[in-house]
Structure formats: C-alpha cells, structure tokens
Image (tube, rainbow, N blue to C red):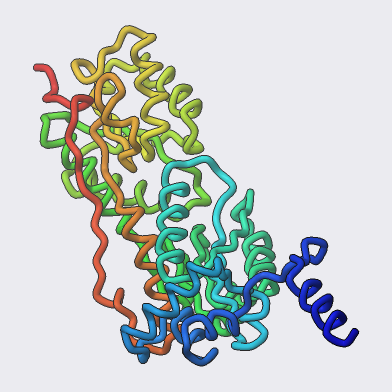
Amino acid sequence: MVGAKAEEQHRVSEVPHNNRVSRPPAMTDVARVAGVSTQTVSRVLRNHPYVTDDKRRRVLDAVEQLGYRMNTAAQALSSGRTRTIGVVSMATESYAGAMTQSSIERAADEADYSVVGAQISTLDVDAILSALRRLEKLGSEAIILAVPLRAQDRRIEEITKRVPTVTIGGSPVRTARSLAVDQREVARLATEHLLSLGHCTVWHIAGPNDWVDAVERTAGWRDVLTDAGLTVPPMIHGDWDPESGYQAGRWLADRSDVTAVFVASDEMAFGLIRALHESGRRVPEDVSVVGVDDVRLAAYCTPALTTIAQPFAELGRAAVASVMSRLDEREDPTLNLVVRPKLIVRSSTARKRA
C-alpha cells in the first residue's frame, strides 16, 4: 500500500498545473539560469561597467530565454531611482516640437530611461509651474523644459534647484543648463540672403510675441536692416499656423513694393505662398520667400522653400545627455556644444528683377 500511495503521489506531481496562474520570471530566476548572483543581474540590467563580458552575456541570454521584464516600480523602491525624465512641451502639432520630442525619447530609450510628458496649452508661468510640479510628483529624476519662458520666476527656480533641469529655447532659468539655437543668427541668415539677391528691404511675418524665438528673430531681422541703413517695413504677426501666413499674404500681395519676405516658420511661409499665388504674384519671380525650420515638406512644395534649418534632433539628444551627466555626477558633455542654424537655398528665392 505504501508503494502504491507513493506511486500515486509521483503521478500527481507530474500532472501539469494548468489551473494555476504562473508567475512571471523574477530576477532570482535570471540569476539561477545564468549562474550568477542577483546583484550581478542587477548590475547588467543597469548597464553597470564593472561586469565581465562573459557574465554580461550569460545574464542577457537568460533574460531573453526567460522573457524577463524589469519591474520598474520595484526597481524604484529598491534603488531610489525611477529612471524617468520629464518633458514640458507645448500642446501643438508643430514640426519643431515633434522633432524635439522624438529625439528626446530616442536618446532616453537608448540610455534605458523612460520619458513622461506634461503638455501645456499656454505659456503662462502658472501653467509651466503646474507642469513642473506634476512631473516632480510623478518621480521624474530630471526635467527638460522645452517651452520658452520669458522671465525668471522664483517658484520655478525652486523646482529646478531640486530636480536637474535643462531648458531648450532660451528660458532664463539660473539653475538649469540652457541649450538653444541663436535665433538672431537665424534671422541674420535669412535677411542677409535676401539682401544679397538685390532686394531693397525685407518684410517679416513674425511669430507670437510671447515666444522667445519669435522675439529674437524679429530683433535679428531689424538689426540687419538697421545696420545696413535700410528701411524697416511694418512687422506682421502670425501664430505659427499656415492660416496666419495666408492672411498676412493676402495683405502683402496688394503691395507692389514687397519683393522679399522672411517668414518666422515654414508653415506660415506655405500659407504666404498660397496667398501670393492666388493674387497672381509669382514666387520667386515677383516675391522671394524664406522660412524657418526646414520641415520635410519644404523640399517638396512648389516652389521648393528656401529656409533656415534648425538642429532639433541634436538639441534633443544633447538635452538628455546633459541631464544624465548631472544624475551620474560626471562632466556635462554638452558644455562646449555649439548648435548652429543653416541656410538651405532652394527655389523660393531669386535675384530681384530690374
């Protein structure tokens, strides 16, 4: 009887436990399969440099074999690190914002960081402050402030003292690393290009007054004309949208003295060109047009748009590298970084007709 009972127990033990919910593989399982300690597994998953190539390979093979996925919540509790970067951005469909955001996410992913976003619909200081506080509560280890802030604010400075922060776009935050393209240089490249083609002056369709980039481009455009002793035409404000460029173009089309226009964004430039075309004024034969950003469509519209390209991808990667250097307490690799705009000459500009 004893033997029969033992044999029955043996048979029961061989029956698959199909009715049981199997647990996901744990770090201890990875360690067992790889033949290493759980500490070594942790070091490999955190990309720690002091692990031999053999152990690293065994751990990664075990991770793939078991289908192990790190429990980020448990990791945060055990290490005090969330490996999360917060990004404050505008809730827009602009090319610049999309390119910057995607480059940040790619760079963070390559470094095994997650990105959590906080979008705002207005550049009001309280909206920016609320977004920063939300990201801090969510456990962001660092923050990238990718919106323009016109003036310093004590409450924002208090947060950036606690959380390593990088700004993109020239926001004046004393305790944050600032990465930005010189927007006056953007305007200089555009305006001087048009003047070099023999145009007597350059008109300007600007962006919104509450954007630092727009204000700086306007200042750069005005400086070039003033330094050259040329007439500074009345400035026209847009809102980055093609419709605002179109409306500005309907007004400009009626002025025969308009032969060159510097537009603060490619999207507004598309609207301007459409309005000029509808009015019978040809680009570039009658009016030369320069935009800003070098969106993908710029090379394929008719005529192909001359524009000032901005290194959005480089800025996004640099922002991630900068905050990570502060988190890891090492030298910031972006300290000597210089990001420059570039004039891309296409078919929308030509010499002024005699």
Q: Residue furthest top?
A: 280
Please, is residue 86 above or below residue 312 in the view?
A: below
Please, is residue 65 above or below residue 103 in the view?
A: below
Along the horizontal axis of the image, is 22 left or right of 217?
Answer: right
Instruction: Identify the residue at image location x=76%, y=67%.
Output: 15
Image x and y of residue 37, in percent: 51, 92
Instruction: Identify the residue at image location x=30%, y=40%.
Output: 294
Q: How many marks?
A: 0
Q: Of residues 286 and 315, which is closer to you in this image?
A: 315
Q: Quadrant of residue 291?
A: top left
Q: Of residues 348 and 163, which is closer to you in this image?
A: 163
Along the horizontal axis of the image, is 112 left or right of 24?
Answer: left
Instruction: Identify the residue at image location x=78%, y=72%.
Output: 11
Q: Of residues 173 and 114, which is closer to you in this image?
A: 114
Q: Residue furthest right?
A: 1
Name the quarter where the C terminus is drawn: top left
Along the horizontal axis of the image, is 53 left or right of 119?
Answer: left
Q: Quadrant of residue 52?
A: bottom left
